[in-house]
Amino acid sequence: MSAMFDFDAGRYGAYVWPAYAATAIVIAFLVIDSLWRARRWKRAAEGGERAP
Amino acid sequence: MNPFIAILRRELAVSWAGGGGPLVAIGFFIALTSLAPLALGGDPVRLAEAAPGIAWLVLALASLISLERMFERDFEDGALDLIALGPAPLELAAFVKAIAQWATTQAPLALVAPLLMVALGAPWRLAPVALAAALAGGFGFAFLGGVGAALSLGSRRGGVLIALLVLPLFTPPVIFGAGAIEAFAAHLDWRTPLLLLAAYALAAAALCPFAMAAAARNALS
Amino acid sequence: MFPALANPARFMAFSRWAAPLLGVIAIGLLAIGLALDFRAPPDYQQGYAVHIMFIHVPAAWMSLVVYACLGGASFISLVFRHPLAQAAARAAAPLGAGVTLLALVTGSLWGKTTWGAWWVWGDPRLTSVLVLFLFYLGYLALDASLDDEARAAPATSILALVGLVNLPIVHFSVTWWRSLHQASSVFRADGPSMPAIYLAPLLTMALAYMAGFGALWLVRIRAEVWRRRAQVRAVRAAG
């Protein structure tokens, strides 16, 4: 448990970090979109001013 | 009159009346094929090697041309409603529509395909296999395309949407059909892919009418 | 369990606690997974690029899991005409498209390091994932283009079932094609046998992705249920 995390990518960095970035971006988008959608339609269903 | 024959006669008449029947698709096929050498660089050896593949690709694309009208005209002028309410099951009507589609579009294209393949430089001895593959593959394209056409009824996007829906379904026949021709060219086992292609086409003919009818019923409801 | 979920009100009550719980579990597993990921040493053959495997393989697995869920929900929707099933199918599609895209992108980056190529035509698995992505796009396009919702449900369900049957055939056809062309692809997603130091982060990340999908799927279905309720409200208010 004393080992630090290994972030030294060397020459693979140009491939590894974009892969993680793409993953983070897509996951973030899906999470935000899903939560936004739920909030929006919950308001419409209960508040009622906005038409679907 | 036998409903099968009645629907078939009507479909064939409508198809020819609507503007030259298969001629449009054939014209498109020829036009696109003539672009191929320009796109690939005129090296005759490379072109001859790619000829079966190009012909198949263009065959698949040309098949898409008349798909949109397969159900749409009848849908819009109410004929599809009458067919759905008529004595024959909608599945049979869908089956016959696909047969008519094959007869008026894919079968003529299949006759032209070997000629265009040879025009691109493929050897003549490939022509019979190419013809058989195109006839069988075209049969599959007609039924699979019909599913896409029926699903898109009532949508705003029409032709391009049908293409997107249908191209994943076209993948196996394209692979088996082109593969059969290439296997024949390389003196490898060409019967297996041709049989697989025929099997896929027959399975499509058996199953797709149910999907087409369900989709058409849904659009009419 | 399923009858309990079939009733929209009961589903909403269930998902109210289940979705956040799955979300918390997903975040926890993700944290552990990433920790295990970056404590794992570089691979003898792949070097540091092995770290891509931990986000590629789970994405690829999920693309198929979501596809199965989409197919199952569509089947129930078509056969039993259950609106909640249709909501589930619609909700799964964008999530499926997202993970499949990630599988393709991370796979391409990984492939560049391990085989030297961004893409290999003729590999059955790659081609199948690409066709799967096209299928998701087709599903989303059809769903978006059919304005009449009552009609969109059976149509997209039919498409989902047709696509479900088609994908194994595509995989088989490309496998056959590869045997014809004797492509020298030695692609395997995860080496000959995986040592525990790699298996642990991989499985943890896979579970994290599963839990995350579960959470987001429930959230999106809830959104669908509210959307329909909002529609009913609007119709009543106008009428």
Image: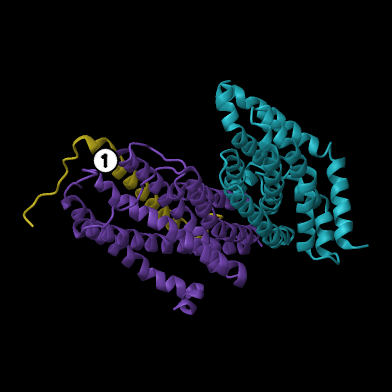
Chain colours: A yellow, B cyan, C purple
- The answer to whether residue C56 is left or right of residue B212 is left
- The amino acid sitting under disc 1 is Trp
Residue sitting at x 57%, y 41% = B187
Question: Residue lying farthest front?
Answer: B187
Q: Nearer the viewer, residue C42 or B78?
A: C42
Q: Chain of mark 1?
A: A
Secondary structure beneath disc 1? Answer: helix
Q: Quadrant location of the N terminus of chain C?
A: bottom left
- The answer to whether residue C187 is left or right of residue B159 is left
Residue sitting at x 49%, y 42% = C181
Q: Is residue B188 visible?
A: yes
Quadrant in the rendering for residue A17:
top left
Question: Residue lying farthest left?
Answer: A2
The crowding category of the residue bearing disc 1, from other C-alpha atoms within 10 Å (few below 14, some 14 to 19, many at least 20), is: some
Q: Position of residue C39 (x, y in %)?
A: 16, 52
- The answer to whether residue B186 is left or right of residue C50 is right
Residue C5 vertical position relative to residue C123 in the rendered view, above or below: below
Q: Position of residue C104 (x, y in %)?
A: 40, 45
Quadrant in the rendering for residue B90:
bottom right
Q: Position of residue A25 (x, y in %)?
A: 34, 45
Q: Nearer the viewer, residue C138 or C221?
A: C138
Q: Is residue C27 visible?
A: no
Q: Quadrant location of the C terminus of chain C?
A: bottom right
User: Which residue has dot 1 on it?
Assistant: A17
- The answer to whether residue C77 is left or right of residue C118 is right
Residue B38 vertical position relative to residue C219 in the rendered view, above or below: above
Q: How many marks?
A: 1
Q: Position of residue C138 (x, y in %)?
A: 56, 49
Quadrant in the rendering for residue B46:
top right
